Image (cartoon, helix red, strand yellow):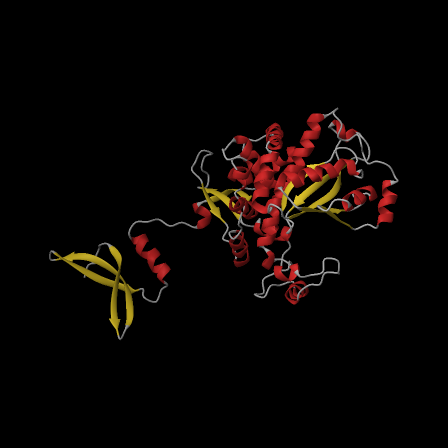
Amino acid sequence: MPARTGAVHVATTTRKYKDKVYRTHLLRRSYREDGKVKNETLGNLSHLPESLIDIIRRSLQGETFVATADAFEIVRSRAHGHVQAVSVAMQRLGLASVLARVPSRERDLVLAMVAVRIVSPDTQLATTRQWHSSTLAEDFGVLDAEEDDLCAAMDWLLERQESIEQALATRHLRAGGLALYDLSSSDFEGHCCPPAQRRTLQLNYGLLTDVRGCPVAVSVFDGNTADSLSFLPAVQQVRQRFGLDQVVMVGDRGTISSKAISEMRSDDGIAWITALESVSIRALVGQGPLQTGLFDERNPLEINRVRAHILLCMLAYYVEWHMREAWRELTFADTDQAAQAERDPVAPAKRLMAVQRKAQGKTLDNGQPVHGFHTRMAELATLVRNTCRTPQAGPDAPSFDVLTTANACQQRALELLGTIRS
């Protein structure tokens, strides 16, 4: 009998017996005999996995399948998960509208700089170079930004400081309520700009927060902050500006002098907390003023850049603060906020049992590892955006992106960020 020729295909039949469905997959050839179409069964494929049967069916229909390595190549990989986390938090907070209601190039640059302060803070020049190693520059639309663009955007930001802080105060401060005012200082480093050419430089600033510690506004003080004439009028101005009944000053390392304490005692609207005894404060005050010439008028441009940088850091911390709050269950933080409110603020803090279990076992109740904020961000950074294309294709050949699939822990972290409320 001569060998038959004809198209080979997969035929699938379905039958139901006693509420159970049976599927049979047969490999068949169609041929003609005496003018009639007949089928010849070549084999039974029912024992094979459904996915493999589908490939056989599609291959017989003309599709071509190749090995993954031969189909495409990865031409670029960028860390993405940590950028996505910050972007989600900023969107939930409506930060773009806080900066300016009308979209602009400057607003995009400031948003990108806020994000990079959380993801990987660096100098302005390094920022424009290294943020291309992640998806940050692409996702925030600042691929072509240079150092001068960032400087111009910071000038734009400083001009909008009052309106930005007013928007945050409307959200988080209750008129006639209580706020915290943290006095602090930082070393000022550098070699190029004129202020950095002096010795033992120090910046002094005050951060206004709500009772939870959520940042709202920041001030940089002229001259010596150990002198109450410098910062107390600024604090009074903050009280009037935001309609606060009481502001609690929190200071360290001598930023609150004995003279300032005396003046605050005479004002019912200002209280104070300091980690130093009054004897230590008087000893520090006796050492002389701290950098009284730092904020003179000789270099106003550089001073404004410093002020803008501090404002930028405050906005980054505003976003990070909300991310930390959203991730309390995944970190070593205490999740019982009601218990925190009842604690003695002076007595040594005691961890709740749930927090002790996380700290001792380094794991959550579901067995997943506990992370701090920075290691959580590092873990999210392992979610990568790969750009792929056909091997040996030209530089103008079409490409496509493939994202790493998030594991359960990463997925939960991203979901929690979706609970942030502005």
Whole-percent x, y for residue 2 in the image: 19, 59
Count up the numbered dots: 0
Q: Quadrant of residue 11?
A: bottom left
Residue at 62%, 36% (x, y): give it.
Answer: 127
- Residue situated in front as seen by the camera: 117 or 175: 175
Q: Quadrant of the N terminus?
A: bottom left
- Residue situated in front as seen by the camera: 359 or 228: 228
Residue at 75%, 41% (x, y): give it.
Answer: 185
Residue that extends furthest to the bottom in the rendered view of this protein = 18
Whole-percent x, y for residue 56 in the image: 33, 57
Whole-percent x, y for residue 367 in the image: 58, 65
Residue at 78%, 36% (x, y): give it.
Answer: 229
Whole-percent x, y for residue 42 in the image: 26, 63
Question: Left of 146 or right of it: where is 388?
Answer: left
Question: Left of 115 or right of it: where is 394?
Answer: left
Q: Quadrant of residue 258?
A: top right
Asked if residue 389 is positioned above or below residue 22 in the image, the reply reads above
Asked if residue 9 is positioned above or below residue 300 in the image, the reply reads below
Residue that extends furthest to the top in the rendered view of this protein = 298
Residue at 69%, 61% (x, y): give it.
Answer: 343
- Residue situated in front as seen by the camera: 62 or 328: 328
Look at the image and tell me whether residue 344 can be seen.
yes
Question: Left of 296 or right of it: where is 310?
Answer: left
Look at the image and tell me whether residue 121 can be seen.
no
